[in-house]
Image: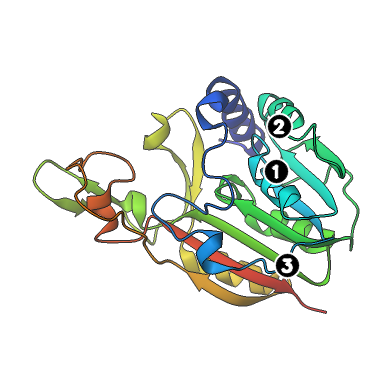
Amino acid sequence: METEEILKLNKDSWELSAERFFGRTALPEYGPLAPTEHQLQLFGDISDKKVLDIGCGSGHSLQYMGDKGANELWGIDLTTKQIQTAQEVLRNQKVNVSLFESAMEEDPGLPHTYFDIAYSIYALGWTTDLRRTLMNIHNYLKPEGIFIFSWEHPMHDRIKYTGEAFHLEKSYNLEGPEFNEAWHNNVVIFHRKLTTYINTLVETGFMIERVVDDVLLPEGEVPQDYTKWYSVQKAQLLPTTFIIKARKRS
């Protein structure tokens, strides 16, 4: 499929499904069964910072940033319904809010060399062009600005429960666009190795400060649900989520 076809397919699917994700996987959470910002403290002091959310969804991560004292709240998202919801969620913020309906591969007119912080919570992996998206983010940031993102660990959907045990079902090494099983094959997401994310960050002018793939398992007894997409049983074997903090070189 061509890039424009993938973007249209994904946008159409998100427009139909957006309400299921309102407020889910938003800061201070980084992802399912992963450490939170309360534990990791990756952002530091957000007071008076200009922040940009890549794939801002329903706006709840931006709301968190506003509540923590950010000075300007900016976001982009592919989905009309998400932008509309974010506008409602953020309408009582006392600072400037600017939202753009746009694919992250495109620059919708955001200011360059402007933001102190850019971040993406479980959204960056939707890009059809990782290098172009990271170059955009690099352009948006001030020198020494930070970029933090989380995404599903690329080993997670390689492993599948087959009724008796977890088995490797797909090659980790084979990268490229795939219909996504968790979305009932109604969207296309690019499979990329963890090293691809790291190396592309470096190649586009970022310094890696931290990589996190720890698992945060619930305490006490948990239901035995091996078939759940983000099951505790699977997370006992491998991470669900990875998180990277990088900084734009000065």
Residue at image coords 64%, 37%: 57
Say which label, 1 or 3, has the lower sequence index. 3
Residue 184 figure quarter: top left
Residue type at mark 3 is: Asp
The residue that disc 3 covers is 45
Q: CA distance from mark 3 to mark 2?
A: 23 Å
Against 11, residue 152 (above or below) is: below
Mark 3 and mark 1 in contact (Cβ < 8 Å)?
A: no
- Is residue 223 toward the left or the right of residue 19 in the image? left
Q: Judge left or right: residue 154 versus residue 94.
A: left
Total count of labels? 3
- Residue placed furthest toward the left: 164
Q: How is colour applied across the structure in the image? A: rainbow
* Crowd class of label 1 (few under 14; some 14 to 19; many from 20; radius 10 Å): many
Q: Which residue is mark 1?
A: 63
Q: Determine whether 27 is above or below 4 in the image.
A: below
Where residue 100 appears, as percent x and y from the top left, is 80, 37
| Mark 2 vs 1, N-terminal side | 1
Q: Secondary structure at mark 3?
A: loop
Query: Which mark is first along the chain, 2 or 3?
Result: 3
Q: Amino acid at mark 2?
A: Val
Q: Which three-letter amino acid code belongs to the residue tagged 1?
A: Gln
Left/right placement of residue 109 relative to residue 223 reads right
Pointer 2 and pointer 1: residues touching (CB < 8 Å)?
yes
Image coordinates for residue 99, horizontal then vertical, percent: 81, 37
Q: Residue at x 83, y 58 (%)?
A: 140
Name the residue tied to disc 2: 89
Other residues around mark 2 within 10 Å, as few (<14) / some (14–19) / many (≥20):
some
